[in-house]
Image: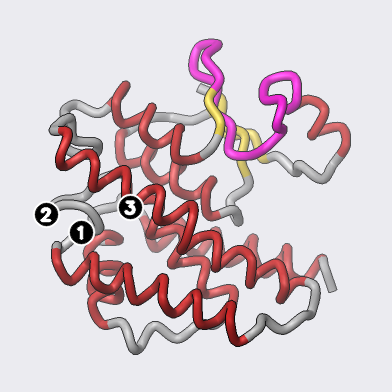
Amino acid sequence: MDYYYSLISPPCQSAYLLAKKLGITLNLKVTNVHDPVQRDALTKLNPQHTIPTLVDNGHVVWESYAIVTYLAETYAKDDTLYPKDPKVRSIVNQRLFFDIGTLYKQIIDIIHLVFKKEQPSDEQMEKLTKALDLLERFVTERPYAAADHLTVADFCLLSSVSALSWLKHDLEPFPHIRAWLERVKAELPEYEEFRKQVEAETKAYVASRK
């Protein structure tokens, strides 16, 4: 199973961590979409030439949210990670859509500004705070993002919230998010070692842009 990715990308991290949780061995293909040669090669599989991209026995899936749901439905031993019950699944899906359309969107927009050495506006920071307020509410109502157990929503939201380290954003005002983070991390194999790898690659990437 080929996995085209970059470890510093939060969406790439989500599917990577889920595959590890499921015991799937990925054939990792580090990909720089800004490199013309690598981008052209990826375009042959994925016309949007985006990462992550997964190739499973000839079946190509891209977009991290599509990949995590595909992996859970195809390879999980039961439906715990992506419940079949329509009501529970609707909550999991809502959290995934919340992440891509609200939380991660706010985070990545601000990170892009920081890379360009621009300051985010007060309005942007307020939108980020409101998104975190919503996540705080979600993980106050339940021990996990969408249920009383780990689901694919936790993998995606974990990667998004972890990206706040790029901004040195303070999570002190969000005690339930901080507790949820520790709860999720404890369920992921070798997570601390994984974060060290991410941080090392992130530092190298930031240094290369100076």
x and y percentages locating residue 166 in the rendered image: 59, 73
Q: Which residues are magenta?
A: 42-60
In the rendered image, the residue lying farthest to the right is 36
Residue labelled with disc 3: 95
Between label 3 and label 1, give the one nearer the viewer: 3
* Distance from the alpha carbon under mark 2 to that under mark 1: 6 Å
Residue 87: name its quadrant: top left
Residue 182 lies left or right of residue 96; in this view the side is: left
- Determine whether 75 is above or below 201 in the image: above
Q: Which residue is mark 2?
A: 148
**Residue count near mark 2 (Cα–Cα under 10 Å), binned few <14, some 14–19, many ≥20:** few
Q: Which residue is mark 1?
A: 144
- Whether residues under marks 2 and 1 lie with C-beta atoms below 8 angstroms apart, the answer is yes
Query: In the displayed structure, would residue 98 be above or below residue 16?
Result: below
Quadrant where the C terminus lies?
bottom right
Secondary structure beneath label 1: loop
Q: Is residue 133 left or right of residue 208?
A: left
Q: What residue lies at 32% left-to-right and 21% top-to-bottom?
A: 74
Residue drawn at point x = 81 percent, y = 66 percent: 208
As drawn, the residue found furthest toward the top would be: 58
Q: Considering only vertical position in the picture, is 189 above or below 80?
A: below
Q: CA distance from mark 2 to mark 3?
A: 14 Å
Residue at the front extreme of this rendering: 123
> In percent of the image, x 49 and y 75: which residue is there?
128
Asked whether 203 or 48 is in front, the reply is: 48
Q: Position of residue 152 (x, y in %)?
A: 31, 44
Is residue 56 magenta-colored? Answer: yes
In the rendered image, residue 93 lying in the magenta stretch gets the answer: no
- Tag on residue 165? none
- Three-letter amino acid code of the residue under disc 3: Arg
